[in-house]
Structures are given as structure tokens and as C-alpha cells.
């Protein structure tokens, strides 16, 4: 079953994915994971259903994660 592009991600799903990505970044230090963390934080910072405190924290921290990416701008493509 494919996810429709028109359906926005639920805030809870983004938070769960963010925790997963941050955990794996802590284990590996992979700059591509830092890119993904930064992008998820940007999404949550603008998500209308995310609690204000989550939006504010993500807005303030996504740049820090961008810095952790160390110039990497693209996450690794998924194998199909």
C-alpha cells in the first residue's frame, strides 16, 4: 500500500522517526543521519499538529544538526 503524497505525516510519526534517527546517529556519528535529523526537525518545526514546545525546540535545533552533518547535504539513497 503506497502512501499518498497529499497526506501529511502525523506529528507522532515524525517524532518517532526522529528518535530512531537520533539513536542511530549516536551509535554511528554518520553525517547523512544528521542531515535526516535536521530535515525531520524542520518538518516538525512547521507541523501544525505538533505541540508548540516541540515546534519551538525543533526550530531552534535543526541548524545544530545541519552543522553536525559537516557539509553533507544528502541522505544516502535507499536500496530498492
Image: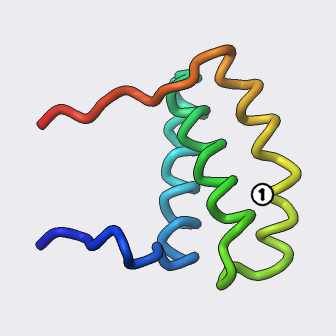
Q: Residue furthest front?
A: 6
Name the spot of residue 30 as percent of width and height, x first: 53, 22
Secondary structure, mark 1, is helix
Name the spot of residue 80 as percent of width and height, x first: 11, 37
Against 61, residue 35 (above or below) is: above
Q: Is residue 2 left or right of residue 32?
A: left
Against 69, residue 43 (above or below) is: below
Q: Residue at x 31, y 30 (%)?
A: 77
Q: Is residue 62 left or right of residue 1?
A: right
Q: Residue at x 25, y 70 (%)?
A: 3
Between residues 8 and 36, which one lies in front from this camera angle? Answer: 8
Which of the colour schemes (rainbow, by chain, secondary structure, one colour) is used? rainbow
The 10 Å Cα crowd at callout 1, few under 14, some 14 to 19, many 20 or more, is: many
Q: Residue furthest top?
A: 71
Q: Which residue is mark 1?
A: 58
Against 12, residue 30 (above or below) is: above
Between residues 53 and 25, which one lies in front from this camera angle? Answer: 53
- Assign the N terminus to one quadrant of the image: bottom left
Q: Residue at x 45, y 30 (%)?
A: 75
Against 32, residue 45 (above or below) is: below
Name the spot of residue 41 as percent of width and height, x first: 67, 54
Residue 34 picture quarter? top right
Residue 55 picture quarter? bottom right
Number of numbered discs overlaid on the protein picture: 1
Amino acid at each position: 500500500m503506497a502512501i499518498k503524497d497529499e497526506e501529511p505525516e502525523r506529528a507522532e510519526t515524525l517524532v518517532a522517526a526522529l528518535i530512531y534517527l537520533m539513536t542511530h546517529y549516536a551509535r554511528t556519528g554518520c553525517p547523512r543521519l544528521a542531515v535526516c535529523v535536521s530535515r525531520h526537525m524542520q518538518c516538525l518545526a512547521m507541523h501544525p499538529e505538533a505541540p508548540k514546545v516541540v515546534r519551538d525546540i525543533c526550530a531552534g535545533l535543526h541548524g545544530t544538526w545541519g552543522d553536525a552533518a559537516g557539509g553533507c547535504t544528502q541522505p544516502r539513497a535507499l536500496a530498492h
